[in-house]
Image (cartoon, helix red, strand yellow):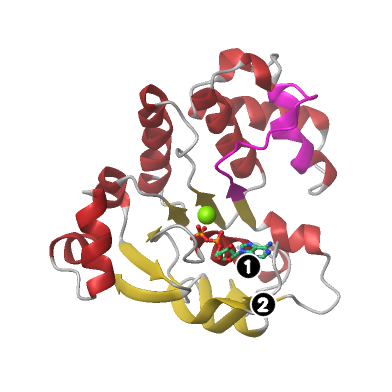
Amino acid sequence: MTPSVLPEPNRGAQSTDPLVVLEGVNKHFGDVHVLKDISTQVARGEVVVVIGPSGSGKSTLCRAINRLETIDSGVITIDGRRLPEEGAPLAHLRADVGMVFQSFNLFAHKTVLENVTLGPIKVRKTSKADADKRAMELLERVGVADQARKMPAQLSGGQQQRVAIARALAMDPKLILLDEPTSALDPEMINEVLDVMVQLAKDGMTMIVVTHEMGFARKAANRVLFMADGRVLEDTTPADFFDNPSSERAKDFLSKIL
Ligand code: ADP
Ligand code: MG
């Protein structure tokens, strides 16, 4: 690939550089210090699972990486590009980072297919024909191609969440953030979504996944970040985290969920 056809910025970024770098990130909501001096990195193709008690700052961390929240101090860099970057439109910064929420967040008044094509058409300026073709491939990949003409409410929760994953992938993001993607699902639907996530991980997608699904963490994660009270207390391999947690908070947390 010649430099002229590389996707915009990052011409200096090397494929061996970490994709995401957080350095001394702090965030307050009023008097509450929600992210405390968070520093970590995510390599390209790495799958990082974020675990921790409710209120520990996991969602805020995801939202900060996706620019849905500002930070008070520190630096977040994605693919060599410090965010926010002067003059860069937010939509394009966000397009590099796909996000999947607990509550699916599909557009209720658009078909499944339209949910997946909207971003590429509006933000990437992809033609409708190309966007439709790619969307059908992605819906096939997550196993819901036969639902393309339906409205989201006609689908099960597990199907809707798989559409949400296809929608995130349609923007060709460099990174996908999934914030408790299976927490709102009935138990029998959890595995169909986890299976798609495991396949994505195997395909080399860089992923940050907030989840308490320990099976997924053991099977698919390269690293586990354990958060408590706005701090990252453990940043290690799944095996090390589950079998040999170093902090009392992690031991206590694991004793309650395992
Ligand atoms: P988690 O996802 O780990 O449950 P969150 O990141 O959602 O944690 O929340 C971390 C802390 O920040 C909690 O104390 C929560 O109440 C607070 N918080 C989150 N979002 C807001 C907000 N928009 N305004 C005020 N406080 C918030
Ligand atoms: Mg949360």
Check disc 1 and give the amino acid type.
Answer: Ala
Q: Are marks 2 and 1 in contact (CB under 8 Å)?
A: yes
Ligand 1 lies in quarter? bottom right
Label 2 CB-ligand 1 distance < 8 A:
no
Label 1 CB-ligand 1 distance < 8 A:
no
Of 114 and 140, which appears nearest the observer?
114
* Residue at figure coordinates x 45%, y 38% from the top left: 182
Of 24 and 128, which appears nearest the observer?
24
* Residue at figure coordinates x 64%, y 14% from the top left: 154
Residue position marked by numbered label 1 in the rendering: 64
Magenta region: 99-120
Quadrant position of residue 92: bottom right
Residue position marked by numbered label 2 in the rendering: 71
Judging from the image, what secondary structure is the residue with disc 1 in?
A: helix
Is 167 left or right of 141, judged from the image as shown?
Answer: right
* Residue at figure coordinates x 42%, y 41% from the top left: 197
